[in-house]
Image (tube, rainbow, N blue to C red):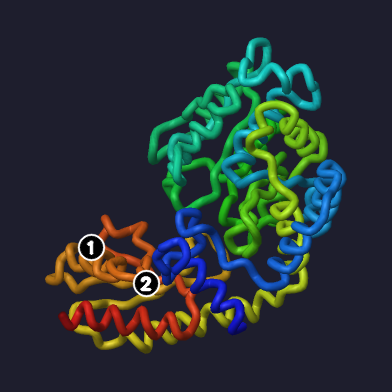
C-alpha cells in the first residue's frame, strides 16, 4: 500500500497534475473509476503478453453472455464508440463490402430514429455519434413529448436502420416512449433497438430482457475497470459490430487491457455482494449527513439514483433567502486549490448540488465536509 501511495504521488508530482477528490461520481472527465485491485491485476497481467485479438474478443463475448444473459458481446473503446459501431452494424450486417463502404450509406438503410428528449450531450452530442457512422439521425417528437404514433410514422417511412434509445438521467424524464414499448414498435417493423446505458451496468440484465437488440454500457464506471465499452445483445449484430474493426471501427478498437479488464470486471460483479455494496454506500451517505448537519443556510436531503441503481446521493440546497449563488460559490470554492474537490453540479442551475460518495474514502469524506463547513462559516 505504501508503494502504491508513493507511485500515485510521484505521478502527480512528476507531471504537475492536480490531485482530485471526486465527490461527483463516475465521470469520464475525471478519468473514469478507480480500478479495483482484482481488475487492475488482470489488466496489468495482459500487458505482459500477446493475444490473437479476435480470439480475445470471442472470449469476451462468452463472458458477456454468461454474466448478462445476452446472446453474445464484444468490447469497444468506450460506450460512445459502441454507439457509432452499433449503428454501423445495423446498416451493414456481416457484409464486409458494406462495412468497407461506410461512411457512404448509398443503398443502405441509413435513418436512425431517436426521441428528441434523448438527444443528450455526454461530452459530445449523441446525434454526432450516430452521424459518425454515416447514418442520418432523425429526431422524433419534441423535447418534452414523443408519441408512439410519431415513432410508428417514422418507422413506416422505411430506410430505418435502428432506433437509438437512451437510458440516462440526462434525458427528459417525462413525455417519452418507454423502452419496452419502443422495442415492441420496432419489432413490428423488424428494426433493431440500440440502448445507450453507459452508466447502467447494474441494470444490464433488465435492459437486455426488454428484447433490445444491442445494449451498451461502460466498463470504467460502476464496473470499475479500465477504459472500455461493453456491447451485449444479438449475436448476429454483435458479430457485425466486431466486423466494423475492419472499417470505420479501426480507430475505435479496444486494446488487450480494455478487453481483459472488462472480462475481469464482469466476473467480479458476478461474485459481488450487491446488498453489502449498497449498505456501504448508505453508510457513507449517513456519515455525510451527520457531518454537515446544522449548518446555517444549508438544507440536506437524499436523492435516490434517478436511473434506479441501488445507491443514493446527498443533496445540498441553500435555504430560501441564501440564493442560488451560494451553490455556485460553494462549487467554485471547493474546486479551487490542490487538491480540487469536484462536486456533482448537474443541477446547479436548479439551485442545488449533490455529493456522490461512491469514489470517496472515509478520510476524503471528512475533508470534504470540513471544507464545506469552512466555506459556509466564511
Quadrant into which the C terminus falls: bottom left
* Nearer to me, 86 or 260: 260
Between the C-alphas of marks 2 and 1, the distance is 19 Å
Residue 328: image tag: 1
Instruction: Examine the image and state in which quarter residue 201 appears.
Output: bottom right
Camera sees residue 188 = no
Give the residue at x 19% y 78%.
Answer: 297
Q: Earlier in the sequence, mark 2 or mark 1?
A: 1
Q: Residue furthest front?
A: 14
Q: Is residue 62 above or below residue 35?
A: above
Tell me the crowding category of disc 2: few under 14, some 14 to 19, or many 20 or more residues within 10 angstroms, Cα based.
few
Residue 175 position in % (x across, y down): 44, 43
Q: Under tag 2, what secondary structure?
A: loop
Look at the numbered disc 1 and give the secondary structure of its residue.
Answer: helix
Q: Nearer the viewer, residue 182 or 53?
A: 53
| Residue nearest the observer in this picture, 209 or 341 | 341
Please tell me whether residue 220 is drawn above or below residue 319 in the rendered image.
above
The residue depicted at 46 percent of the width and 46 percent of the height is 122
Q: In this view of the protein, can residue 377 be seen by the observer? A: yes
- The mark closer to the camera, 2 or 1, is 2
Please rate how many residues cluster around mark 1, counting C-alpha atoms within 10 Å: few if below 14, some from 14 to 19, many from 20: some
Residue at the image point whose x is 62% and y is 77% from the top: 277
Residue 353 in the figure: left or right of residue 169: left
Taking the image as shown, residue 65 lies to the left or right of residue 319, namely: right
Residue 117: x and y in percent read 44, 40
> Is 19 placed left or right of 151 in the picture?
left
Q: Is residue 257 left or right of residue 318?
A: right
Residue 339 tag number: 2
Residue 112 placement (x, y as % from top left): 58, 27
Amino acid at each position: 500500500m505504501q508503494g502504491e501511495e508513493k507511485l500515485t504521488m510521484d505521478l502527480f508530482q512528476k507531471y504537475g497534475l492536480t490531485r482530485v477528490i471526486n465527490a461527483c461520481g463516475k465521470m469520464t472527465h475525471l478519468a473514469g473509476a478507480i480500478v479495483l485491485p482484482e481488475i487492475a491485476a488482470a489488466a496489468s497481467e495482459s500487458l505482459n503478453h500477446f493475444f490473437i485479438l479476435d480470439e480475445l474478443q470471442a472470449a469476451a463475448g462468452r463472458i458477456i453472455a454468461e454474466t448478462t444473459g445476452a446472446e453474445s458481446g464484444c468490447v469497444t473503446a468506450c460506450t460512445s464508440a459502441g454507439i457509432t459501431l452499433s449503428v454501423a452494424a445495423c446498416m451493414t450486417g456481416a457484409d464486409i463490402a458494406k462495412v468497407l463502404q461506410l461512411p457512404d450509406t448509398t443503398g443502405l438503410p441509413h435513418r436512425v430514429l431517436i426521441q428528441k428528449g434523448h438527444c443528450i450531450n455526454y461530452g459530445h452530442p449523441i446525434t454526432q455519434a450516430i452521424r459518425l457512422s454515416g447514418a442520418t439521425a432523425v429526431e422524433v417528437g419534441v423535447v418534452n413529448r414523443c408519441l408512439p404514433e410519431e415513432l410508428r410514422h417514422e418507422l413506416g417511412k422505411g430506410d430505418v436502420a435502428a432506433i437509438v434509445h437512451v437510458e440516462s438521467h440526462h434525458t427528459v424524464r417525462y413525455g417519452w416512449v418507454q423502452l419496452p414499448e419502443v422495442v415492441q414498435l420496432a419489432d413490428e417493423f423488424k428494426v433493431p433497438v440500440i440502448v445507450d446505458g453507459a452508466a447502467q451496468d447494474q441494470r444490464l440484465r433488465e435492459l437486455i430482457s426488454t428484447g433490445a437488440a444491442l445494449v451498451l454500457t461502460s466498463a470504467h464506471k460502476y464496473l470499475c475497470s479500465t477504459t472500455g465499452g461493453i456491447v451485449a445483445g444479438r449475436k448476429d449484430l454483435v458479430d457485425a459490430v466486431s466486423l466494423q474493426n475492419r472499417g470505420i471501427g479501426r480507430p475505435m478498437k479496444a486494446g488487450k487491457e480494455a478487453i481483459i479488464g472488462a472480462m475481469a470486471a464482469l466476473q467480479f460483479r458476478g461474485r459481488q455482494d450487491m446488498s453489502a455494496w449498497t449498505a456501504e454506500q448508505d453508510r457513507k451517505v449517513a456519515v455525510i449527513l451527520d457531518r454537515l448537519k446544522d449548518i446555517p443556510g444549508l438544507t440536506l436531503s437524499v436523492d435516490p439514483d434517478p436511473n434506479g441503481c441501488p445507491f443514493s446521493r446527498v443533496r445540498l440546497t441553500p435555504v430560501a433567502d441564501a440564493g442560488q449563488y451560494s451553490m455556485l460559490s460553494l462549487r467554485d470554492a471547493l474546486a479551487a486549490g490542490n487538491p480540487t474537490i469536484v462536486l456533482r453540479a448537474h443541477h446547479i442551475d436548479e439551485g442545488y448540488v449533490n455529493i456522490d460518495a461512491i469514489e470517496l474514502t472515509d478520510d476524503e469524506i471528512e475533508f470534504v465536509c470540513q471544507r464545506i463547513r469552512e466555506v459556509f462559516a466564511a
